[in-house]
Amino acid sequence: MESKYYLAVEINPNNYFPINLKDLSLANYDINYDLESIDNFTVKYSINEIKEAINKANILSVNDTMPLVVIYYEKNVVRKTDVLTKEYIYDMTQFIKTNFNNKDFINKIYNFLNNKLKVEDSNLKKPTDYLEYIKTINNLPYNIKRKLYFYLYGML
C-alpha cells in the first residue's frame, strides 16, 4: 500500500501540523495524497505564498521560523521531506545534458542512486547515449527522481 503524504508545518522539531490543501484558497481542484500530486501543487507557489494562504485560511498562524515540509508515515515513524516550491525550480534534464561528458558528475549520480537509493542499472553507470540516459532516469519511480532532483539542485 502506498503511503499518504501531507503538506505540513513543522511547529517545533518533530512536531507537525498537517494542512488540508482543500482549505487553501490556492487549491482550486482536488489534490490526492500522493507525493507527486502535492509536488504538482506546491511547485507553482513560493514558500511565502503557501504560508500566506495558510494564514488567510485561519488554519494556523504560521511565521518564518516554521518550515513547510511534506510528511509521511514509514516504519511506524512520521518522516519528513522538503517541499518542492518555486524556489527549487531548475531544468534537471538540461543540467544533466550540460554535464553529461563529465565523468565525475555521472559517477556522482550513479553513486547517489546506487549507494543511497539502491538503484542498480547498467545504463546509469557508464552511459554512452545522452537520450538513453535521460530515458533511464525518467523511468525511475517518482520518489527516486525527486530525491535525485534535490541532490542535483545542491550541486548548482
Image (tube, rainbow, N blue to C red):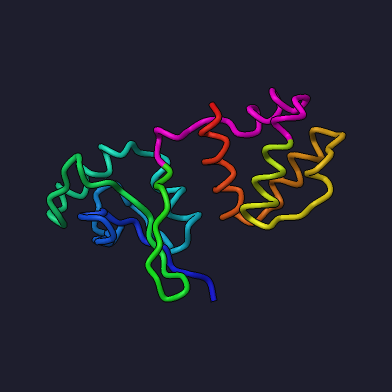
Q: Nearer the viewer, residue 25 or 155?
A: 155
Residue in view at x 76 percent, y 44 percent: 135
**As drawn, 117 above or below 92:** below
Q: Measured from the top left, where is residue 81 in percent x and y?
A: 42, 53
The majority secondary structure of the magenta stretch comes to helix
Residue in view at x 54 percent, y 26 percent: 156
Q: Is residue 99 magenta?
A: yes
Which residue range is magenta in the image?
A: 85-106
Q: Is residue 15 magenta?
A: no
**As drawn, 71 above or below 50:** below
Q: Quadrant of the N terminus?
A: bottom right
**As drawn, 104 above or below 121:** above
- Quick check: 87 left or right of 96? left
Residue in view at x 39 percent, y 47 percent: 83
- Quick check: 134 left or right of 23? right
Q: Nearer the viewer, residue 26 or 71?
A: 71
